[in-house]
Structures are given as structure tokens and as C-alpha cells.
């Protein structure tokens, strides 16, 4: 056995989204948020319920996106995916609020169970700048997916480029 540094190899592949961007092979599902069909939206906050809602706007990461309107404090986007492959959910988000306030990171639930997410692009501390989140692996099947923002401050929430990728094992 040799202990020379030239004889050592490194395996830096990580299996947890808490550590690094998971490697993916092919896209299973993609939605660029140009249409609200197939999604359920909830937005609550201060004011009349009819003045707090989600809409499609042209201020997305890539063209259009989903965006809340009104004095919103909590918001969620829910949709269903039926796949025959395991997948890793990736999406872009940003929040608008007070200057110098960090982005509000959403929770992600699969079939009402919270799963881990990790930032793979962007900076949580940059309010109003896009960042990309990735989930841990989601098992194949019919899954209810919910992206939920919660807080007490009035903010504008944005979601864009929702994708499910097949992981490399």
C-alpha cells in the first residue's frame, strides 16, 4: 500500500441535497410557468381575499413566472406529477419585500410530507434576486407536490422553471 499523494483518488459525489447539487441525467417534467392550468394556488395576507392572488407575469427567471399580488404573507403552489422514474425537483424562486431582507425559502412537501431542499444557484441573502432550489430524491408514482412560503412580513413571491430531473445513481 502506498501513501503517496499521486496514488490517492477522491470520490466527491454527494448523495444529499444538503451538501451539493445532485447529478442528474434527463428531464422528466418541465413547466416554464406560462399558464396556471394544472396548478392550485393559495395566497393569504392583509386585505380582502380577492386582492391577494397568484398571476402569470413576464418578470420571471426565464420570461414568464408565477407571482403573488397584494399584501401577501403566505403563499403556496401545488400540483400533481405521475412519473415512472424517481426524480429531483428543481425550481427558481425569489421574494420581494423590504430592502436588504433575505429571500424567504419555501418548504417543499411531497404527499403532505416535508422533504429537504438545498440552494444550488444564487444567494438566500439577496432579496429580489433569483435562486434555484433542489429537493432530495422523490420516488416514482403519483405525487402531490407543494411549494409553500410562510412568514409574517408582507412579500411578493415568485416561482419559475419547475423541473423534475432523473437522478444519476
Image (tube, helix red, strand yellow):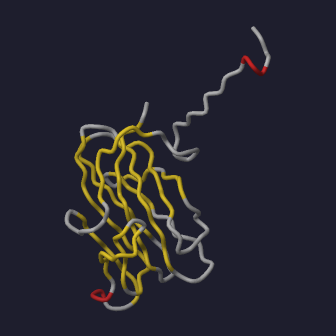
Q: Nearer the viewer, residue 29 or 44?
A: 29
> Residue 26's x, y, as percent?
35, 40
The picture quadrant where one finds residue 36 is bottom left
Position of 51 relative to 126 (above/below)? below
Q: Residue at x 52, y 74 (%)?
A: 128
Q: Foreground: 30 or 77?
A: 30
Residue sitting nearer the eye, 167 or 57: 57
Quadrant where the N terminus is found in the figure: top right
Q: Where does the C terminus fall, quadrant-wise?
A: top left
Q: Residue at x 57, y 83 (%)?
A: 98
Number of numbered discs overlaid on the protein picture: 0
> In the current view of this chain or complex, which residue is farthest to the left?
37
> Which residue is farthest right?
4
**Residue 38 coordinates in the image, percent (x, y):** 20, 62
Q: Residue 137: x percent and y percent?
A: 41, 42
Residue lying at the far top of the rendered structure:
1
Q: Residue at x 38, y 64 (%)?
A: 160
Is 71 situated above or below 33? below
Q: Is residue 69 above or below residue 149?
A: below
Residue 165 falls left or right of residue 81: right
Amino acid at each position: 500500500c502506498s501513501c503517496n499523494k499521486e496514488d490517492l483518488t477522491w470520490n466527491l459525489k454527494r448523495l444529499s441535497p444538503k451538501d451539493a447539487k445532485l447529478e442528474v441525467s434527463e428531464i422528466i417534467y418541465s413547466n416554464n410557468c406560462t399558464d396556471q392550468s394544472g396548478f392550485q394556488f393559495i395566497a393569504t395576507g392583509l386585505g380582502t381575499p380577492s386582492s391577494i392572488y397568484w398571476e402569470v407575469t413576464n418578470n420571471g427567471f426565464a420570461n414568464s413566472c408565477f407571482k403573488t399580488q397584494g399584501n401577501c404573507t403566505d403563499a403556496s403552489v401545488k400540483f400533481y406529477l405521475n412519473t415512472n422514474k424517481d426524480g429531483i425537483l428543481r425550481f427558481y424562486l425569489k421574494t420581494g419585500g423590504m430592502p436588504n431582507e433575505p429571500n424567504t425559502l419555501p418548504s417543499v412537501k411531497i404527499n403532505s410530507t416535508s422533504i429537504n431542499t438545498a440552494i444550488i444557484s444564487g444567494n438566500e441573502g439577496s432579496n429580489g434576486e433569483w435562486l434555484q432550489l433542489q429537493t432530495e430524491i422523490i420516488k416514482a408514482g403519483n405525487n402531490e407536490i407543494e411549494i409553500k412560503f410562510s412568514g409574517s412580513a408582507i412579500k411578493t413571491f415568485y416561482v419559475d422553471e419547475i423541473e423534475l430531473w432523473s437522478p444519476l445513481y
